[in-house]
Amino acid sequence: MEQMSFLEENDALDTLEFTPTRAAGLKRLEAFIPYSAGAYASKRNFDFGPNQRSNISCLSPWVRHRLVSETEILKETLKQHSLRSAEKFIQEVYWRAYFKGWLEQKPDVWFWYKKDLKSVIRQLEKDGRLNQRYEEAVSAQTGIDAFDFWARELVETGYLHNHARMWFASIWVFTLQLPWELGADFFYRHLLDGDPASNTCSWRWVSGLHTKGKNYAARASNIAKFTDGRFAGHMGLASDPLPLTEEREPRLVPAPTGDKHEGEDFALLITEEDGLPETLPIHSKPDQVIGLLATERRSPLEIGQPAREFAKGAMADALQRAQTVFECPADLLDGADWSQSLLEYAQANSVKTIVTAYAPVGPVASALREAKNILAENDIRLLQVMRAHDVSSWPHATRGFFKLKKQIPKLIESLDNS
């Protein structure tokens, strides 16, 4: 008998649709805000299953592509709740800023991950046993019911509850004894909210590399409790596993401040890092708007269909809004070679300045860095402007989250200026 898909098995799936538009994200935000205080704090760690997501915001796919901004979420939350009552939810918003700021100031970690990922992928080709364990994990054939359920849920929906992500990563590393880089890649390829910083740092945190010597061990009793008994009983999970270690130490570099746009004629470039062109800190309307996608650059392996389609839809939505707001043409360029696409477009349209939202460490940043050099050789400037939320929060993300957490009240006070 042919195996049924995850969605077919849950034919009564009554859950949020992750429609990749700003309007859908704002609708979800509006619906969730009333529950972002006490109800969220008490129930946020429960994974009740994909058809019961009212206890969490599920905003991350829209925020990851900045169809909805962190500043908007904070302001809307504080219209209905005090900082104290909505503390847990507000902290979750700043966890995203923390991971981005941390990786921005310790970029070696990202480049180590990319290099090591290529190495372990080559190991899959040589090590039959490793390859078998890996294939069983990504195809939901490990025999660990909870893990296999989450593997299927991830591939077919592009989403997992945050607690499930922690359990999954812990089982991957310590029970299945698979390289963490392959697990991070599996998530990054399939998650609608796949983000270089949050994903990489979270996998390293579970493994014991982010906070050295402190790992996260998934336990059957914890899974049973916080899945409301959906998964219970003996799972054969690793007991008291030791954290992973590494000898290298990343450099600490200054937090970026971005470029200043002085108002000269320019073309605006939209990437999947920021789908809110209408609120960027630019001083005049662009003459033209263009978009480039970097989704396929996430991994050497195949990108999941839900993640690919969400990024594509988010870009289409952003381009449409930009065209309406700025009253100028908005076109999606070929993303295979960003340097060539941008150069050809600029030369064909007499563009001397291209402005885009600052791209934190990841595939988009790498593509922009390469393109900037090529464009400069042809007397074309590429400027990256930063949002106030990033400028104010990232410098506090050099160590653990607590350093940034202490600054949240002051950061909240400055929201009106962001």
Image (cartoon, rainbow, N blue to C red):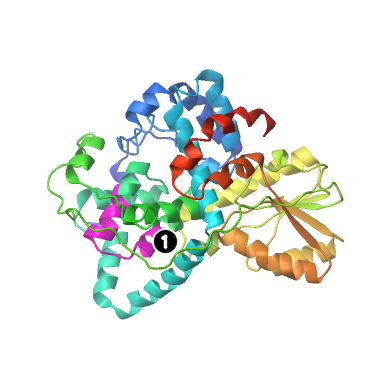
Q: Residue at x 57, y 42 (%)?
A: 393
Instruction: Looking at the picture, tell me which residue is in the foreground, 175 or 68.
Output: 175
- Image quarter where the C terminus lies is top right
- Range of magenta residues: 167-186
Q: Relative to the observer, which residue lies in front, 411 or 293?
A: 411
Q: Residue furthest bottom?
A: 126
Q: Which residue is mark 1?
A: 185
* Residue 157 on image: x %, y %: 40, 47
Please say whether residue 269 is visible from this viewpoint.
Answer: no
Which image quadrant for residue 351? bottom right
Q: Is residue 266 left or right of residue 394?
A: right
Left/right placement of residue 348 relative to residue 165 reads right
234 part of magenta stretch: no
Q: Which residue is located at x 79 percent, y 71 percent?
A: 377
Question: Mark 1 falls on what kind of element?
Answer: helix
> Residue 137: x, y in percent?
28, 60
Please, is residue 9 above or below residue 178 in the view? above
Q: What's the residue type where badge 1 is placed?
A: Asp
Q: Quadrant of the N terminus?
A: bottom left
Depth order, front residue of 115/338? 115
